[in-house]
Image (tube, rainbow, N blue to C red):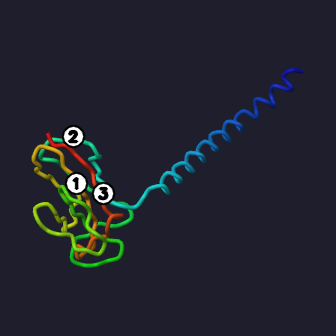
């Protein structure tokens, strides 16, 4: 008589197990989708963060979300290239990014560079600009402070 009740219960275990793993997978997929929708557009330093202590020369890896990197020259929607401003701030939207020893242009579409910096505290501002070096402004810039040993 007991077998009569145990057997149906055992047959239900695989169904319960399948449903719980399906729910878990669905929850994981929902979390991933939610995480990706929280990603903000803009530029970022791939390998550096605010407050890092580094040695010179410093390798700089540049990243962008929400735009495509292309060489300077043509103006295309949602494209641009990087500039690094050493010990300075972002360039206002619509203004041309200066070109001098502290305003570095990566007009060939480069995403990595090596900078030789003197020991001490420095700010690095990553600035995205269009094909004619016109800045996309503060929203497309990122400034971090680093210390060079």
Within the image, what quadrant is residue 108 found in? bottom left
- Residue to which mark 2 is pinned: 53
Q: Which quarter of the rendered picture does the C terminus lie within? A: top left
Q: Which of 79 and 10 is in front in this view?
A: 79
The numbered disc on residue 145 is none
Element under disc 3: strand
Q: Nearer the viewer, residue 136 or 6?
A: 136
Residue 55 appears in which quarter of the rendering?
top left
Residue under circle 3? Answer: 142
The front one of 132 and 51 is 51
- Around disc 2, counting alpha carbons within 10 Å, would you say few (fewer than 14), some (14 to 19), or many (20 or more)? some
Judged from the image, the secondary structure of the residue bearing numbered disc 1 is: strand
Q: Is residue 66 left or right of residue 28?
A: left
Where in the figure is residue 140, as x and y percent of width and height? Answer: 33, 64
Q: Name the residue under label 1.
A: 124
Against 74, is 56 above or below?
above
Place of residue 12 in the rendered image (x, y in percent of width and height, measured from the top left): 76, 35
């Amino acid at each position: 008589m007991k077998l009569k009740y145990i057997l149906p219960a055992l047959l239900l275990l695989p169904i319960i197990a399948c449903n719980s793993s399906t729910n878990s997978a669905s929850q994981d997929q929902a979390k991933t989708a939610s995480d990706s929708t929280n990603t903000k557009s803009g530029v970022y330093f791939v390998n550096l963060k605010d407050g890092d202590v580094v040695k010179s020369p410093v390798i700089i890896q540049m990243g962008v979300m929400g735009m495509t990197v292309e060489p300077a020259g043509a103006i295309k929607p949602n494209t641009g290239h990087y500039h690094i401003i050493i010990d300075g701030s972002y360039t206002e939207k619509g203004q041309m990014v200066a070109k001098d020893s502290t305003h570095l242009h990566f007009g060939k579409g480069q995403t990595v560079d090596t900078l030789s910096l003197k020991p001490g505290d420095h700010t690095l501002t990553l600035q995205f600009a269009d094909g004619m070096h016109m800045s996309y402004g503060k929203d497309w810039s990122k400034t971090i402070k680093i210390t060079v040993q």
